[in-house]
Image (tube, grey):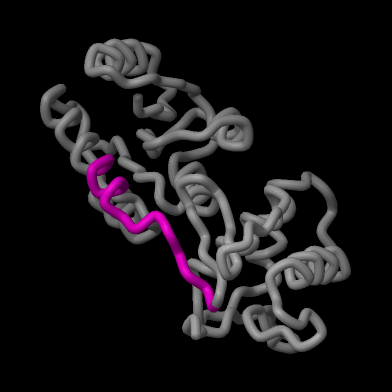
Amino acid sequence: MAHILLVEDDPAIVNTLTDLLRSDGFTVTSTPTQDEALALLNQQTFDLALLDITLKQGNGFAVCAAVKARFPEVPVIFLTASDDEYSTVAGLDMGADDYIAKPFRARELLSRIHVALRRKNEHKAVIRLGNLEIDTTAALVHKEDVDITLSALEYKLLLLFAQNQGKLISRDALRNVIWESASEYVSDNTINVYINRLRNKVEDDPAEPKLIQTIRGLGYKTVVMTKE
């Protein structure tokens, strides 16, 4: 059964939505603040996030960014004020999948949720990067049919590279992923250590990396390769 993260600080709306979603078979975990939502994302997995934009502590934009950084395939639906066009556009621009204006009709909201979940399930679960296959559903990595054992952090870093093939990945982007997972100060040397660990597991020759290449002074770039 799909698990929904509900981030909303109006108790009346939380109660109404929780009852509605549970009556349709969903599991619901709710929180009223940005910080609690970020903590939940580190502790649990969700199939969809339903976010109010304006919160008493933080905002839905930050939660959306965190969802997409950790679980890019998880749909995000914003709850917006009916006359707040700027917030709606900003939310979609940053990766939200849909929005629904308050006050909303129950059937319309449920329909939007089901559509978003169907789209998610239709997405290809396997990402190929050179001779690697990344099963995003099971969080497994294979190299020429051999299982590659990665730590949770190494997997997140690899997934970031695989989903941005051919694009420059800045050190700040990597620093954010490492900080969220390791909760430690992230120096340039720390980034180098984690990248080297990942290369040792996924590159044919870690001393001459082909998949994850260093762009000196800028960050790293994943080279688009085809499996021979």
Q: Which residues lie in the magenta part?
A: 116-130
- Tell me if 79 is positioned left or right of 56 in this view: left
Q: Is residue 21 magenta?
A: no
Q: Which is nearer the eye, 194 or 198?
A: 198
List the single residue furthest toward the right. 189
- x, y percent for residue 103: 18, 26
Work out whether 142 lies above or below 213: above
Q: Which is nearer the eye, 84 or 114?
A: 114
* Residue under the point 24% across and 12% down: 23
- Tell me if 2 is positioned left or right of 178 in this view: left
Give the number of marks: 0
Q: Which is nearer the eye, 82 or 64?
A: 64
List the single residue furthest toward the front. 145
- Tell me if 183 is positioned left or right of 174 in this view: right
- x, y percent for residue 104: 17, 28
- Tell me if 57 is positioned left or right of 113 in this view: right
Work out whether 194 lies above or below 72: below
Q: Is residue 117 magenta?
A: yes
Q: Which is nearer the eye, 38 or 210?
A: 210
* Residue under the point 22% across and 18% down: 24
* Residue under the point 69% across and 87% down: 215
Work out whether 157 lies above or below 215: above
* Residue under the point 57% across and 70% down: 144
- x, y percent for residue 71: 49, 48
Location of the N terminus (image quadrant): top left
Quadrant of the image occupied by residue 192:
bottom right
